[in-house]
Image (cartoon, rainbow, N blue to C red):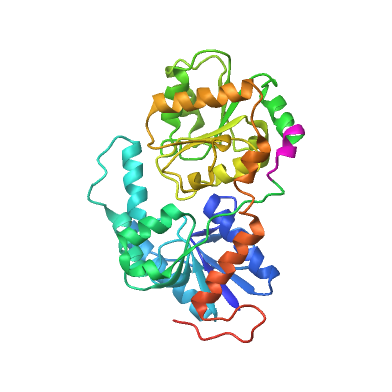
């Protein structure tokens, strides 16, 4: 098939959704499909043939609506047999919403900032909500791949009409790249670069949006932590100087909080003793899966879709609610004690995600795409007609 990927920016280095989309595109190329990407901007190194699509408008909302239409039209003009999209569009064969229901994301962002969760959504967000309803409530998306059970649940609740089009496609992880064996090389190398000795418990926080992912709660929890020394590395957060100031204001000014540039994730989770994601909202939370695959326990919240993978006490702790520094501190104390006693079973931690191998994940998504286009399973004959 000729498959069109519809996205704002075709740049795998931008974030989790972009990396996942590029990985799926590369998988389809390996499977013999022809991949085309339609976007406002594109990285020449990204998989497939890129097509730049422009959309103008006096307001952001108008530009977003016009882009939603222009991307679909461009894929049609290029003769695509199937389309895949992660952004809000007018229609698409396979919809893969990495942020889940947009309303839930907006409300979580406001709660994380201490604001009312029910404002009147302005401008572009109203446009996104309308496009999302067109995809889910009105049938614009033929099949919807859900990155977690959390996403499947909330989409079915907000858009009951789409329930029979929702498919479980839980995000996977590269089990070769993320492995406990990396602790002895890449992990120790990064600890050396960070000047963290082997006896100091190291907590890791990774993510650009510090507020939504719960960094203020984490800093407050750590400010009240007593006992042996520890260090926190904050990797890849936006506005790093601001977060250094916040840490100092919390009394964390003794070199315990290291705010650094984005790090190689495999090295970061191999270096860490505990990964912390006290998030207010993550439809999946790839850092959780990657950390578990590396054999590093996780402390997160039930607001992370990937929390479903923390299936045993050995793998870490899932807090029922975000924004609770005392509960987070208690969970971190427990994990720090396990590290100090050298009782972390890294094989048991990793076992929580061994069923999420990258190949299995990609095969699930390919099956969703074939279903969306009416195509048979590979090896059974020709392709059926497109729906649009």
Left or right: where 75 falls relative to 262? left
Q: Is residue 178 above or below residue 19?
A: above
What's the residue at 38%, 62% (across, down)? 64
Give the overall secondary structure of the magenta segment. Answer: helix
The residues colored magenta run 178-184
- Can residue 344 be seen here? The reply is yes
Q: Quadrant of residue 229?
A: top right
Residue 302 locus on image (x, y percent): 42, 42
> Which is nearer the eye, 232 or 315?
315
Residue 143 locus on image (x, y percent): 45, 70
> Which is nearer the eye, 217 or 324?
324
- Can residue 57 be seen here? The reply is no
- Farthest right residue? 185
> Which is nearer the eye, 170 or 58?
170
Residue 102 locus on image (x, y percent): 36, 55
Is 69 inside the magenta-drawn segment? no
Left or right: where 2 falls relative to 184? left
What's the residue at 45%, 50% (across, down)? 283
Is 182 inside the magenta-drawn segment? yes
What's the residue at 67%, 19% (across, down)? 199
Q: Is residue 103 above or below residue 297?
A: below
Residue 162 locus on image (x, y percent): 36, 68
> Which is nearer the eye, 95 or 242?
95
* Quadrant including the N terminus: bottom right
Q: Is residue 91 above or below residue 319?
A: below
Left or right: where 7 falls relative to 110? right
* Quadrant including the C terminus: bottom left
């Amino acid at each position: 098939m000729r498959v069109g990927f519809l996205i704002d920016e075709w740049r795998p280095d931008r974030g989790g959704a972009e990396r996942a989309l590029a990985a799926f595109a590369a998988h389809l190329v390996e499977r013999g499909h022809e991949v085309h990407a339609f976007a406002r901007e594109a990285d020449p190194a990204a998989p497939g043939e890129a097509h730049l699509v422009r959309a103008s408008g006096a307001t952001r909302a108008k530009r977003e609506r016009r882009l939603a239409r222009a991307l679909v039209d461009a894929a049609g003009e290029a003769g695509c047999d199937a389309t895949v999209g992660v952004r809000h569009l007018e229609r698409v064969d396979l919809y893969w919403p990495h942020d889940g229901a947009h309303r839930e994301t907006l409300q979580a962002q406001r709660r994380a900032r201490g604001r009312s969760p029910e404002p009147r959504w302005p401008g572009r967000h109203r446009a996104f909500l309308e496009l999302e309803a067109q995809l889910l409530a009105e049938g614009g998306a033929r099949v919807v791949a859900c990155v977690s059970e959390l996403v499947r649940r909330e989409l079915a609740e907000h858009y009951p009409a789409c329930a029979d089009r929702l498919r479980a496609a839980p995000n996977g992880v590269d089990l070769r790249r993320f492995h406990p064996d990396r602790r002895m090389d890449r992990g120790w190398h990064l600890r050396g670069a960070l000047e963290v000795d082997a006896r100091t418990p190291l907590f890791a926080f990774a993510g650009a949006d510090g507020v939504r992912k719960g960094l203020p709660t984490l800093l407050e929890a750590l400010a009240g932590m007593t006992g042996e020394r520890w260090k926190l590395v904050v990797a890849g957060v936006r506005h790093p100087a601001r977060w250094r100031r916040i840490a100092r204001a919390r009394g964390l000014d003794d070199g315990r909080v290291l705010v650094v540039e984005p790090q190689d994730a495999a090295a970061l989770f191999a270096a860490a003793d505990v990964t912390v994601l006290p998030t207010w909202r993550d439809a999946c939370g790839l850092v959780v899966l990657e950390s578990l695959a590396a054999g590093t326990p996780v402390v997160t919240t039930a607001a992370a879709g990937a929390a479903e993978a923390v299936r045993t006490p050995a793998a870490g702790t899932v807090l029922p609610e975000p924004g609770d520094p005392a509960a987070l501190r208690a969970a971190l104390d427990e994990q720090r004690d396990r590290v100090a006693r050298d009782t972390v079973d890294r094989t048991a931690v990793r076992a929580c995600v061994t069923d999420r191998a990258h190949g299995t994940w990609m095969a699930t998504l390919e099956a969703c795409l074939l279903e969306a286009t009416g195509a048979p399973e590979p090896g059974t004959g020709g392709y059926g007609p497109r729906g649009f």
